[in-house]
Image (cartoon, helix red, strand yellow):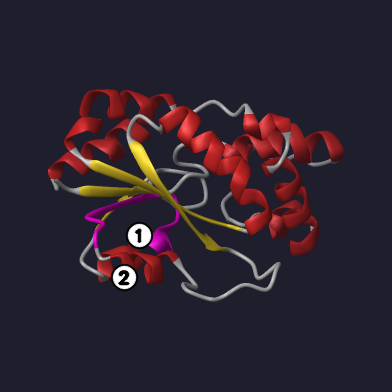
Amino acid sequence: MLTIAWDVDDVLNELMREWLRQEWLPGHPACALTYEHLAENPPHRLLGASWEEYARSLDRFRNSSSARSLAPSPDVLSWLTSHGGNFRHLALTGRPLHTVPVLAEWVFFHYGKWIRTFSYVPSRDDVEMPVYDRSKRDYLQWLGRADVLVDDNRENIEAAISLGIKGVLIPRPWNGCGGGTPEALRRIRET
């Protein structure tokens, strides 16, 4: 049985869209950017913000009640309902540690029927901890079990491909991938 590694933020949910709408724009009413304008991720330069200001805002949202109530992706849920039982699944995200517990609970609440393993790679060294993996590539190489990576980050997809793992890029404004999520998910079954 093939194993699919799912990125969480902006794949299993719409974190960036909701962060912009619920957290950034209300605090920055002069900002004219829409989600569709976010041609870079992280978008701090486009927002006219420092990386630190952006990261604080994003992390505040990640731990908020709004993030806890993010809707799961209807396209991913539909795909999993139809095809999920034919694969093993794990969640693989990149986040700072202090935002991981909320996300793990969210993943298991919405996707626990299929996803039974949750892993993360620290995205910032915000606390002193042992360094096992510096990237999703490092984690996937260590794991040696994933057959497909579904992610919104082109670099992560390219890194997975370099390991012999099939990559499925979910279209987002910052990755230049055309089409929609259902079309991208169809590529999983072509494995």
Along the polypeptide, which appears first: circle 2 or circle 1? 2
Q: Magenta span covers which residues?
A: 145-156
Q: Secondary structure at mark 2?
A: helix
- Report which residue position mark 1 lands on: 157
Q: Secondary structure at mark 1?
A: helix
| Left-right relation of 48 to 174 | right
| Left-right relation of 121 to 182 | right
Tell me the tag on residue 141: 2
x and y, in percent, of residue 2 in the image = 17, 48
Residue 171 lies, with reference to residue 141, above or below; the image says: above
- Please identify the residue farthest to the bottom as the structure is shown: 131
Q: Amino acid at mark 1?
A: Ile
Residue 87 in view, yes or no: yes
Residue 179 lies, with reference to residue 155, above or below; the image says: above
Quadrant of res 18: top right
Give me the C-alpha separation between circle 2 and circle 1: 13 Å
x and y, in percent, of residue 88 in the image = 24, 43
Q: Amino acid at mark 2?
A: Gln
| Left-right relation of 138 to 60 | left
Q: Residue shown at 46%/35% (left/top)?
A: 108
Q: Residue shown at 56%/75% (left/top)?
A: 130
Q: Which of 122/32 is in front?
A: 122
Binning the other alpha carbons within 10 Å of mark 2 as few (below 14), some (14 to 19) or many (20 upward) gives some
Quadrant of res 123: bottom right
x and y, in percent, of residue 60 in the image = 76, 45
